[in-house]
Image (cartoon, rainbow, N blue to C red):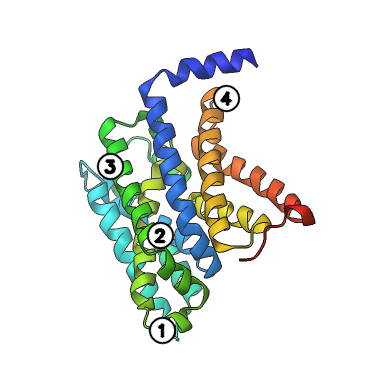
Amino acid sequence: MNEYISTLSEYLSYPFVRYSIIVGALISLCASLLGVPLVLKRYSMIGDGLSHVAFGAVAVAAVTRLTSSMLVVLPVTVIAAVLILKTSQNAKIKGDAVIAMISVGSLAVGYLLLNKFSSSANVSGDVCSTLFGSMSILNLSVNDVWLCLGLSVLVIAIFILFYNKIFAVTFDENFASATGTKSGMYNLMIAVITAVVIVLAMNLVGALLISALIIFPSLSSMRVFKSFRSVIISSAVIAVSCAIIGILISILWSTPVGSTIVAVNIVIFCLFYVAGLLPNFKGHLH
């Protein structure tokens, strides 16, 4: 144990390790805040669909050799979020079908572009890193940290400012609309913020694992707590804790960062699931 503590102390003395922990915690916090309304609205798989869109956008940026892939990935993912929301409101095409179409299509086109036009000598490695996360989270610059911090503060501020509206739209969209709340606008806002979080999380856990950051903390909290506010707070604490623990474990045992964070989330979910079966651990409905 002393050996692990001394190793961690040594690693934490390096700025790049501290940067990765800060970014990982911020991304997980934002994902957990959005996860609760998305899960309750049965729209949690939008994260999976948008992450595949982001993968396709990364492929386009790589093929066109742009210096900053964010210039392509962020706007394309935001546009996809708007399209998913608008198209899913069409009675002829259900929401899950829209997400599946966009998800699979983007993934296929992205891999096709990388396979045929990429100048990289290790296409398979690039694809694997994009899908499952890479160690680039440990190579963050100060500018990357500030960018993530700025976007995270924006997401958290919007969530706090519009907390009551998000609560209303989440639980009864029709009633919220009847009382004058512009449900469509707030749904659009949630979709756009989700797209931003997806783009931020690409380097942390990869395109295929992003949904875990959205789903697991929320589901874990819902096993024990029953009020919306309690679930939000618990989900945020779980997400940040799992991110920090996962990053530290990946540093100590040289495991993939994204997969390790998801594995920690799975363990926490199992613990909360068991705790939820015990009456004394049940939260109260407010």
State the residue in front, 33 or 8.
Answer: 33
Residue receiving disc 2: 50
Residue receiving disc 4: 253
Which mark, residue 147? 3
User: Is label 1 or label 3 in front?
Assistant: 1
Q: Are marks 2 and 4 in contact (CB under 8 Å)?
A: no
Instruction: Write the residue at 46% across / 19% down.
Output: 11
Instruction: Write the residue at 28% across / 59% down.
Output: 76
Q: How many marks?
A: 4
49 vs 235, left or right, is: left
Density class for disc 4 (Cα within 10 Å; few <14, some 14-19, many ≥20) is few
Q: Where the C terminus falls, by quadrant?
A: bottom right
Q: Residue 71 at what x, y percent from top left?
A: 22, 50
User: Is label 1 or label 4 in front?
Assistant: 1
- Could you tell me which secondary element the residue under label 2 belongs to? helix
229 vs 115, left or right, is: right
